[in-house]
Amino acid sequence: WLDQVPSSQCRASAIASKMALNMQQTSSKASCSSRRSAVPRVAAKGLSRATTSVVPQKACHVAKVSRKNFNNFETAQQHGSRSVAAAAAGAAGPVKTIDQVYDAVIVGGGISGLVTAQALAAKHGISNFLVTEARERVGGNITSLEADGFIWEEGPNSFQPNDAMLQIAVDAGVDKELVFGDPKAPRFVFWENKLRPVPSGPDALTFDLMSFIGKIRAGLGAVGLLKAPAPAYEETVEQFIRRNLGDEVFERLIEPFCSGVYAGDPAKLSMKAAFNKIWILESMGGSLVGGAIKLFQERKKNPPPPRDPRLPPKPKGQTVGSFRKGLKQLPEAIARNVKDTIRVNWKLSKISKLGGSEGYSLVYDTPEGQVEVRSRTVALTVPAYVAAELFKKDVPTAAEALNSFDYPPVGAVTLSYPMSAIRDDRKDAQGAVPGFGQLHPRSQGITTLGTIYSSSLFPNRCPDGNMLILNYIGGAQNRAISNQSQEQLVKQVDSDLRTMLLKPDAPSPKVVGVRVWPRAIPQFNLGHLETLDKAKSALGAAGMEGVMLGGNYVCGVALGKCVEHGYEFASDIAKRVGSKSGAKQAVSA
């Protein structure tokens, strides 16, 4: 969700070595493809008058401003024109079997599934596939809204503009809509009653977030002169960082980063699973710096393939990206490209192996009744707990493993204040509030996990004279938000902001949006990778090796990670069914 938190948040070892611990690749709260939470909405004149409509998945939302242009992802075939309730009502009749046997069925229309579909068609020349989505729209948790001059996000907020993200923007045809934040904008951590900038380069020795002793400890640990050897057991993020870089780096940089990115508990998160690119450096070179040097040398000997000339230049510095009208423009564009393959309001109720080598049978509850689809391969990009239900009867070992993954709740609270309400010391000479946002260590008495300066990041996000602020609350260490009202959440966030960002006499906020995702972000806790392998092995042993597990609990929670995974997933499918790569087959416009 906080994908805009830059890799500079993790430049602990840069204090002595200038090496960035690039955790950004594994960030982005938003559970990019954790897409099955329902999206009931309530429009209200005021927060106090709002009520919440509860449906089975329980995602709650209230907007103080009226909704407009809500992700219109319905396909041309209008399978989304009826409600899920209608689908359930129609499920009682006979099962209709579609004669066609598909090369692949992609279950889940979040960003992971959509990128897989786009890549199958455009890069591998495979068009004999379906994308099925249980909800009334595709796009997953990407939820961009617009009303009364505001544009805001209630799922993922932004992405790191790596080549995978630029590639999908080009492939989807929305690269001209890209917008990027100012790479020089500061990021802050609230420590000892002050918002302190995070080091981002030359200021690595002068910033005041850490003491001089803490910086020396981090530097010596980074180069391997002051650290204990790696243990034989799997370490948590807390254990790894304290051992390599010291207590201050953990408490003032990494702990708030983990809370803000994973909404997780660093005493439980696995360093190997959650931040593998950092974890592996020590094993490569004996220390973080040693590993970084070896990695650089290896890349110099084996350079990556040439960059696609169609891609726009990589933005310089540590920045984040979005689209002019919000992140929704990406899934909307992909959905238009493959619209004839998409079925919405199709809820998968059963998956089974067909006899011989014919593939798999998938039975769906649809608005037209139960439908059976047959496919040679199945790509599951639904959340782990949804996949677990499908395997409970026939592959219980896989179901048990998948059901063990933790998805804590996260709330997105979007507020607006007049610029006059912001403390003067937070403003620049022009009266603007520079910065990406701020993170809040759990030890500092702030309940809100992190705050994003939405209107400072990207243009035209709110009316002139106002500041739009997106706040995340909840997570693994504050699950009680599921039982709190919207009023209580707004009150808590507003109270926190008055401690850090607002003037004491600031007026009450304009409540732009409040949404609680009951199962938001998969936690890559200790044993995650082994548990995932256990689920995959169980499926293979049950003769379901053509059912492939994907999505953010497999690849990582960052939006960019889900996009990278989508391209890789498509390649895996193409290898299984026989790729027509290079055909550049046209897809539906």
Image (cartoon, helix red, strand yellow):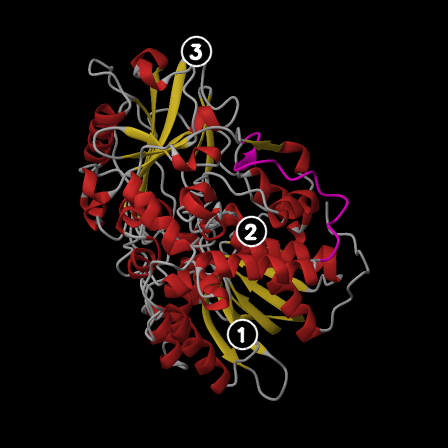
> Is residue 563 visible to us here?
yes
Q: Nearer the viewer, residue 325 or 176?
A: 176
- Separation of disc 2 and disc 3 at Cα? 53 Å
Q: Which of marks 2 and 1 is in front?
A: 1
Mainly helix, strand or loop, the magenta region?
loop
For the point 19% across and 48% down, which residue is it?
480
* Circle on res. 547: 1
Crowd rating for badge 1 (residues with CA inside 10 Å; few <14, some 14–19, many 20+): many
Element at label 2: helix
> Which residue is the site of mark 3?
429
Q: Nearer the viewer, mark 3 or mark 1?
A: 3
- Separation of disc 2 and disc 1 at Cα? 25 Å
Residue 502 at x, y percent in the picture = 27, 20
For the point 35% across and 63% down, which residue is it?
270
For the point 20% across and 16% down, which residue is it?
504
Crowd rating for badge 3 (residues with CA inside 10 Å; few <14, some 14–19, many 20+): few
Q: Which residue is outermost to the right?
A: 583
> Is residue 473 visible to us here?
no
> Which residue is the site of mark 2?
79
For this view, does 109 lie left or right of residue 528?
right
Q: Reply yes or no: does residue 352 show up in magenta.
A: no
Q: What residue type is labelled 1?
A: Val
Say which quadrant the C terminus sits in: top right
Say which quadrant the N terminus sits in: top left
Residue 251 at x, y percent in the picture = 26, 47
Q: Which of 297 and 299 is in front in this view?
A: 297
Residue 352 at x, y percent in the picture = 50, 79
Element at label 1: strand
State which region is magenta: 305-325
Q: Which amino acid does label 3 sit on?
A: Ala
